[in-house]
Image (cartoon, rainbow, N blue to C red):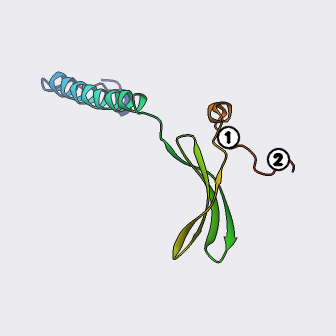
Amino acid sequence: MQNIPTHLILIAPSKSAPRRFARALATLGRHLEVLWRALAAGARRKPKSLLIRETSTLGDRRLVAVVQFERQRFLIGCSPSSVRLLARLPDANPASEAAGAATPTNGGNP
């Protein structure tokens, strides 16, 4: 017999190999089904009505934020011990909601 490299020798499949392959395919199918259902559920999720549009830190663990609930917008101030309503801002217009951006509060100046 010739010297055949061991990495080229084919081993005859056992009788249980088709069964193991079928089990592996079934497991893969179940995982794909779970993934498909999760993606489909995410596509049906309704949009959030409460959004943090913008934040600005003031130092010492304080910040101000523009918070939007549905179309109402609020300027709030936050510290480690309190949250305060600083101002009610003009309602968001549909054009800015579609673009996903907050209306500039400084008149658009840089």
Say whether residue 105 is left or right of residue 72. Answer: right
- Residue 19: percent from the left, percent from the top? 15, 24
Q: What residue type is labelled 1?
A: Ala
Per the rendering, the mark at residue 107 is 2
Disc 2 secondary structure class: loop
Q: Is residue 24 something one can see in this rendering?
A: yes
- Residue 96: percent from the left, percent from the top? 67, 35
Quick check: 79 above or below 108? Answer: below
| Mark positioned earlier in the residue sequence (1 or 2) | 1
Query: Disc 1 vs disc 2: Cβ atoms closer than 8 Å?
Result: no
Quick check: 21 above or below 85? Answer: above
Circle 1 is placed at which residue position? 101
Instruction: Give the residue at x 62% y 35%.
Output: 97
Say whether residue 40 is left or right of residue 98. Answer: left
Q: Which amino acid does label 2 sit on?
A: Gly
- Residue 4: percent from the left, percent from the top? 37, 27
Quick check: 56 above or below 46? Answer: below
In depth, the one of 24 and 35 nearer the eye is 35
Per the rendering, the mark at residue 92 is none
Disc 1 secondary structure class: loop
Quick check: 106 above or below 76? Answer: above
